[in-house]
Amino acid sequence: LEPGTPPWLLHFYMLSLGGAFMYLLMSVWLAMHAGIVAQCASVRMLTQFVRLPVPKWEDFESARTYAQHFESLRFEDMLRVPFTGSLASGQPAAYGTVPKPCVGPGYAEWNQDPAAGTQCGPEGT
């Protein structure tokens, strides 16, 4: 401002300059606060509302394979490259499906007769 400016205009100038700086400080403070609140809401949503399901013991059992199943494969199927061939294209495997594991008293006993289906133990449970 030029010298000789009236003091009341200088006061208004300083008041508007101070208001602009206060607006700048409050906007930075509120932006930081909003960022913290958004991060807290994101963590809360991911841990409490959209939690991934914890697999049960049955899920682990259904995903696992047994050495007896591998030993019953043909020699060509034992030496195949994983994730290629008929399994990768969505076609069923040539050697059938993985048998369901036995649970109960006859856990180690298997009956893999394709005509009868997979049965576990002498009781068929």
Image: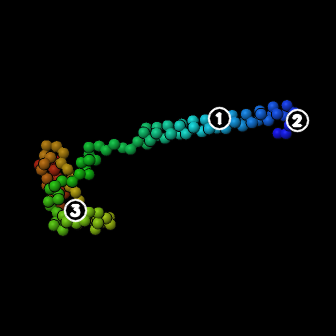
First reached walking from the N terminus: tag 1 or tag 3: 1
Element under disc 3:
loop
Please name the residue that numbered disc 2 is placed on. Answer: 4
Say whether disc 1 or disc 2 marks the residue closer to the N-terminus: 2
Label 1 is placed on what type of residue? Met
Residue drawn 18% across the image and 53% down it:
66
Picture mark count: 3
Query: What's the CA distance linking mark 1 and mark 2?
Result: 34 Å
Look at the picture and state if 88 lies above or below 5: below
**Against 114, is 22 above or below?**
above
Name which quarter of the figure residue 113 lies in: bottom left
Please name the amino acid that badge 3 sits on. Answer: Gly
Pinpoint residue 78: horizontal percent, then vertical percent.
18, 64
Question: Residue beneath label 3, please?
Answer: 96
Decide: few, some or many residues near mark 1? Use Cα within 10 Å; few <14, some 14-19, many ≥20: few
* Residue displayed at 18% across by 48% down: 102
- Cα separation, mark 2 vs mark 3, equals 98 Å
Structural distance between the alpha carbons of marks 1 and 3: 68 Å
Q: Which amino acid does label 2 sit on?
A: Gly
Is residue 64 something that shows in the picture? yes
Q: In this view, does 116 lie above or below 107?
A: below
Residue at image coords 73%, 34%:
18
